[in-house]
């Protein structure tokens, strides 16, 4: 009688680490800085076979491709965001949206977004995006923007005025 035999086995399934795919910019692939700051976002799809809720954090780096991704944030060539938004989760996937505040003097050239994601078991994933371009920004400001010269007769000289000219370009 084989019915009396019992065979039991136990297996442990380890945590599945997240993966990151499909990173791209939100908006155009060319980023034009303004004389203040320009908000720029990159997003990626983070997949975790343990379910999207297992993804606990996401971070991003926006950096000048030629200068590289190492070093501290400098607002010229390197921007980081350690608290990117996780949104739109369903099944095994969630979107990571990283926003960076680019300064007007950001070095022109090719840039890349690097994403990282961590799950509840501290497993991590990293992915790089395609290039984005920051073009040259040629801009100056002069203050005051108007000067009241007053009334002058031929041959007279006006009072001296100070005008401050500021480079707002990169």
Image: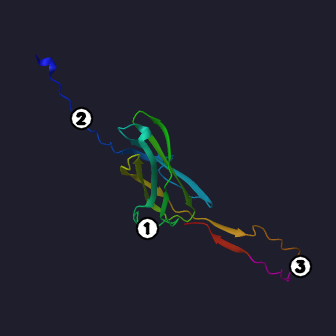
Q: Which mark is residue 71?
A: 1
Percent position of residue 73, x then y: 49, 65
Quadrant the N terminus occupies? top left
Percent position of residue 76, x then y: 51, 66
Rendered residue at 15%/20% (across/down): 4
Q: Earlier in the sequence, mark 3 or mark 1?
A: 1
Rendered residue at 51%/50% (across/down): 41
79 up-or-down from 17: above or below: below
Mark 2, secondary structure of its residue: loop
Left or right, residue 138 beside residue 46: right
Main SS, magenta region, reads: loop
Q: Is residue 156 magenta?
A: yes
Q: Earlier in the sequence, mark 2 or mark 1?
A: 2
Mark 3, secondary structure of its residue: loop
Q: Which mark is residue 10?
A: 2
Which contiguous range is marked in magenta? 152-162
Percent position of residue 35, x then y: 62, 61
Rendered residue at 45%/49% (across/down): 58
Q: Residue furthest top?
A: 1
State the residue position of label 3: 153
Q: Nearer the viewer, residue 169 or 88?
A: 88
């Amino acid at each position: 009688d084989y019915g009396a035999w019992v065979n039991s086995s136990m297996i442990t399934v380890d945590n599945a680490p997240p993966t990151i795919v499909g990173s791209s910019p939100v908006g155009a692939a060319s980023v034009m800085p303004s004389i203040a700051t320009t908000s720029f976002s990159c997003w990626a799809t983070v997949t975790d076979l343990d379910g999207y809720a297992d993804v606990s954090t996401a971070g991003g780096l926006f950096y000048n491709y030629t200068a590289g991704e190492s070093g501290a944030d400098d607002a010229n060539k390197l921007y980081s965001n350690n608290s990117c938004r996780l949104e739109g989760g369903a099944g095994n996937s969630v979107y990571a949206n990283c926003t960076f505040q680019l300064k007007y003097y950001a070095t022109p050239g090719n840039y890349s977004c690097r994403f990282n994601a961590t799950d509840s078991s501290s497993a991590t994933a990293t992915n790089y995006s395609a290039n984005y371009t920051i073009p040259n920004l040629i801009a100056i400001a002069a203050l005051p923007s108007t000067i009241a010269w007053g009334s002058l007769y031929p041959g007279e000289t006006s009072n001296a005025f100070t005008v401050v000219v500021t480079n707002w370009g990169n």
